[in-house]
Amino acid sequence: LTTMRFSLTVVFILFIAICNCKLSNINPHLKFEEKCNGQGIVYSDSNFKKCECFNCFSGPNCENLNENCVVDVAGGNPSLAQEFWENNTSPIGQSESLSYYRSPYELSSNMILPNDEPAMAITQYLRTAIFNIHEYVGNANTKDKYIVFGSGVTQLINAMAYACAEVEGITLPVFAQVPYFSHYKQWAEFNKLNNYWNGSYSQYDHQDNVIEFVTYPNNPTGYLRTPHYSESKYQVHDMVYYWPSWMQKSNETYVGTLPMMDEDIMMFSLSKLSGHGGTRFGWALIKDVNVALKAAEYISISNIHTSVDATHRAIRIMEALVEEEGRFFKVMSSLMESRWNRLMEILNNQNKVTVEGTQNFYYLWLSCKEGIDCFNYFYKGGIKGESGLGFGTTQEKIRIQLTVRSSDFELF
């Protein structure tokens, strides 16, 4: 009996050791807080051995705060969401694939037909994942919509402007209301064969052919905008922020409470849905088959087809968001509300800057006093935001990203 007990004890110890080893192999960066002092992260690229330090930190374990560091809260990187996924130990959402996984080109299409039509290869799973996430959240009507997918919404902006002009057969103006996401103008000025930028609010003699990008909710203000050119045939709704994470307070219901949108063209991205900006994946729901075909043509010309690895990861992430019953949305919404509450305690007790835009949104949009260059004003204080000039407005405005890592936010 003694020998048997000893043997069972040894077996049990070995079993625990093996389990711990396997768990650490599955997600060894779970202890990144200990390895990198909460100021960096380790990836599989270095076999989980080397810290990659966040902004303003350095050292083997990111233990040093860099002297005279300027906190970078410019851009739209959804780094806050990465903290959620680091601590998500569920196998749901993991996207590692075998070495032979879809290694040939998949040339079938960059467009998926509506849900009553057959889909091929990976697109059949992508269609299901996209329709399921929209049905779960209730933010967009997918019925009778074609899906065109590409390398993020940045590429889809180009594809939509190209497609609308190609369908019309003439060069078309691109317009967006101020303040706007700068890429709308950048693309129009780049692709002069199909588009040109016209920021005028008085294009009524040809308003039916104005390509108007309607950011809903708006970047950077968070306001729910309506088109200026309501008679335009080519209204493109950029809805990347139209998710519960950036639209609702933590005490509100997370599913089915956003009004369902049913526009001619609606664009979404994995970046703002789940925080996976580096995957570079976006999709558009399109009513008009001709616009969809031309948009898919643009994707095919520019990069043959969207990466199957990015597509596979997008599918797994969307499945995880639904299967985990919106936990991601709840966590993000709560964190954003907490950050805004802390900010408003400070901003309500000063008279240097004014908050413009909605609270609990992805960005903080501020206005400095007249004549003050708001970007330089904050930069001198050690904070790097984005000047309002890049959004078509004045230097008195500044955009600050609130979805940075916790270490960056605390410094900010």
Image: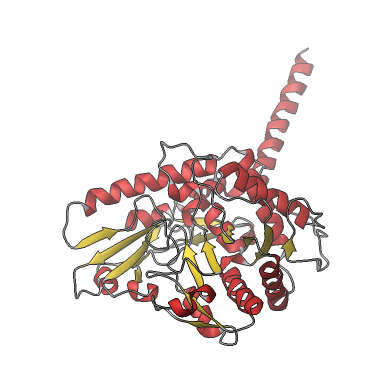
Q: In front here: 312 or 56?
A: 312
Residue that sits furthest to the top in the current view: 1
Would you place residue 187 above or below residue 153 in this image?
A: below
Residue 284, percent from left and from top: 62, 61
Residue 377, percent from left and from top: 24, 71
Q: Can residue 352 be seen in this view?
A: yes
Residue 399, percent from left and from top: 35, 65
> In the rendered view, does 399 fall on the left or right side of 299?
left
> Residue at the spot x=60%, y=69% of the render?
156
Give residue 294's quadrant in the image: bottom right
Q: Can residue 35 be seen in this view?
A: no
Report the coloring of the rendering: secondary structure
Give residue 368's quadrant in the image: bottom left
Would you place residue 144 above or below residue 198 in this image?
A: above
> Residue at the spot x=60%, y=44% of the render?
321
> Residue at the spot x=56%, y=61% of the render?
277
Q: In front here: 17 or 137?
A: 137
Across the whole image, how many numbered discs are drawn on residues?
A: 0
> Residue at the spot x=81%, y=66% of the render?
108
Image quarter in which the N terminus is found: top right
